[in-house]
Image (cartoon, rainbow, N blue to C red):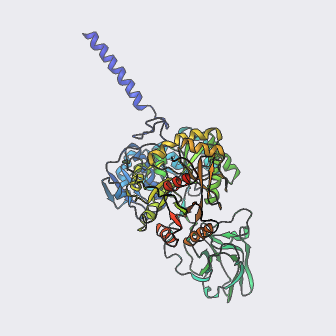
Amino acid sequence: MKNLIRKLTIFSLALLFMLSLSFEAPVSADSNTHNGSIKWPKHQELPTFAKAKHLDVTNVSDAPGDIKILLTTLQGIVNREKPRMYVQQNKVDPWLHDLKIPYTRHDDAMDVFMSYADELKGVIVYDPEIPDSINVATTLAGLKDAVVASPALAKELTAEPYNLKVIEDLQGKFKNRLDAYSWQYENLWSETTKRMLVGLSPNTSVPIPPDNYDSFQTLAIETEQVRDGSNRKTHELDLSSFLGKEAVYVRFNDAFTQDGWGPAVHEVIVKADGQIIAQFKTGTPEEEAFLYDRDGSKFLPGSDHRFADNGNYFLYEFKPPVDTKQLTISVDMWNQYKVSASNVRPLSSEQKEPYGYLRDYAVANKAMVFWLSTSIPEEKELFEKILSDVEPGTPYLGWFDNDFEGEVAGIDITSKHGVYVLPSDWFHNMTVFSGTKAKKVKERKQPTPKLKNKIYVTYTFGEGDNLQYDQNHMRSLWDDPARGKVPINWTSSPLLYEAAPAILHYFQSTATENDLLVAGPSGAGYFSPYAWPEENLSKFLKDGYKYLKKSDMSYPYVLNRDVATDLPLSESQAAAYEKHYKLPGLFLGGGEKVGTDIMNGSFPISYLRGIATVQDGKDLLANYKEDWDGESPTFISIGINAWSMRPSDVLELTESLGPEYQIVRADQYFSLLRKANGLSPK
């Protein structure tokens, strides 16, 4: 008996020792259980977080940037184990109510921080002089169970009552952006997950108050929606009434913000009492001395003008001599300009601060965060090195440097490496949303009308591949009272099925019979089939099909580009979409092209022609009608600019049309199109 007891004791101790080893062994960033309560089986594109039972909520929308990033990185550590924090990043957030999760609001964000501070191992301090150190700090925070803090905030956190230690101080560690990300790649990449990449700008513009330009007076404005430069001339404007202070500020913005053809400026000359004090052509080093705030304006390589479309602008600062009596500005410009001036110094969008949003998700998943430009050779080389290290079919969450130019170049480079993009840099609380569940909603099907000799039109709101659009702007459009009065296709992301099931469920459950969710570019993720490795395309589409099926999003909108040039699908690409996505047809971005094609004798392609205004739509449909003989049905698909139009605009456009037009959903459209071309129904 004593021997038996001894043996049992030895066995129990050995078992206990083995169990202790298994508990203490480091968890691989790519294991099925991943970290904490996160589950990430191999067949899933994105990880699943645990379901939240109660949330501590704090609103940081008006907080300084260092508080935003502090709370959001804390959220990543806390919610990795179990979702308990919800950091409200926007002033208004309808989702908090719709999640149906009990929550407690906390007015002071630092009260929430104090509640969870004991789950941290310390602080990572970023270098304000090197903004990209913020991203390196975010990566380190995920790996070290830490939070990201500014130097000033770190001093508070290392003192009473927090008493946290500084794990890594990045001040003075890096010379520039490339140095920061090169160090990160060499020292941290091996420790981070390879199942996702995260691209985030390290900072963003400080919030611009709504009264920032109240003191500006309009000097010149174009009253027509000119897009072709036909109104180009040199304007002579008097700035004398703004003299008397240190500087005069001149602002250029879009006179028709919904149209997207704002001011184009080639040259500026400023004279003080007849003497030139500023003379420059845009895009030159001489311009930089006066460019106070470039905001989202652009000067494209090879062009001869700076432009600012939609809500963007640019602003110059001129400092005339103290005793100046007359101040004039001469501007060579065209298109839809609005020029205003003031002598009150406005807040500049070039003043930056850190931000939170997707960082909770990056930290929780131990992802490497970076922001590399495709237009700078050394940065592009490092970007491609990172892309080469991951498996084909890996998601890249976030966005790209340099707006549209960054988008087309970024999609091209990621697609060439078999990496698809989920735009999401402004998605908030994904560590909460990915733990929600989506109940199956029965699709509200519409009967297909009888085929007649009509012009069949289908409208599609774009941008749905963008997860942050699905969470934010699409919700605003969805709440438009005109929604449901006209058939509309709404692009969305099939990956919401894993990223944010509650958002997917909301749109599905509140859709009317005139609303149809369809997949955004270019299916299950944003990529270009042209650039995608040919040998991997079929497998990628086959793997992505389950997301279209689970999300009930067929009829994808595809963008097939060679950088910025829209291309037709090849026969093999079309065949792959038809076979692996099991489609009756698809929408294809075709630039100026309209109408339809039948590929491989069986697969309808409808070219999506974009419009930005109601008048654009009227003109497009009137021109299309001119080429119609009226003897047979014809088909046209229209892409609706989601940033300049709403369902009420689509309703206005529809009500202006005659009986020869019939508006249908995508499912009806492709059913009719197949019938008109003698193809079997699908």
Residue nearest the viewer, comparing 123 with 132: 132
- Quadrant hosting residue 620: bottom right
273 relative to 679 in the view: left or right: right
Residue nearest the viewer, comparing 347 with 41: 41
Percent position (x, y) of residue 517? 47, 54
Residue nearest the viewer, comparing 307 with 350: 307
110 relative to 573 in the view: left or right: left
Please report the residue visible at 63 percent of the width from the left and 51 percent of the height from the top: 560
Residue 595 in view here: yes
Percent position (x, y) of residue 325? 67, 89
Q: Residue furthest bottom?
A: 325
> As displayed, is residue 81 above or below residue 556?
above
- Quadrant hosting residue 128: bottom right
Q: How many marks?
A: 0
Q: Residue furthest left?
A: 1
Residue 175 in view here: no
> As displayed, is residue 351 above or below residue 122?
below
The quadrant of the image that shows the N terminus is top left
Percent position (x, y) of residue 45? 49, 42
> As displayed, is residue 64 above or below residue 42?
below
Percent position (x, y) of residue 240? 64, 87
80 relative to 521 in the view: left or right: left
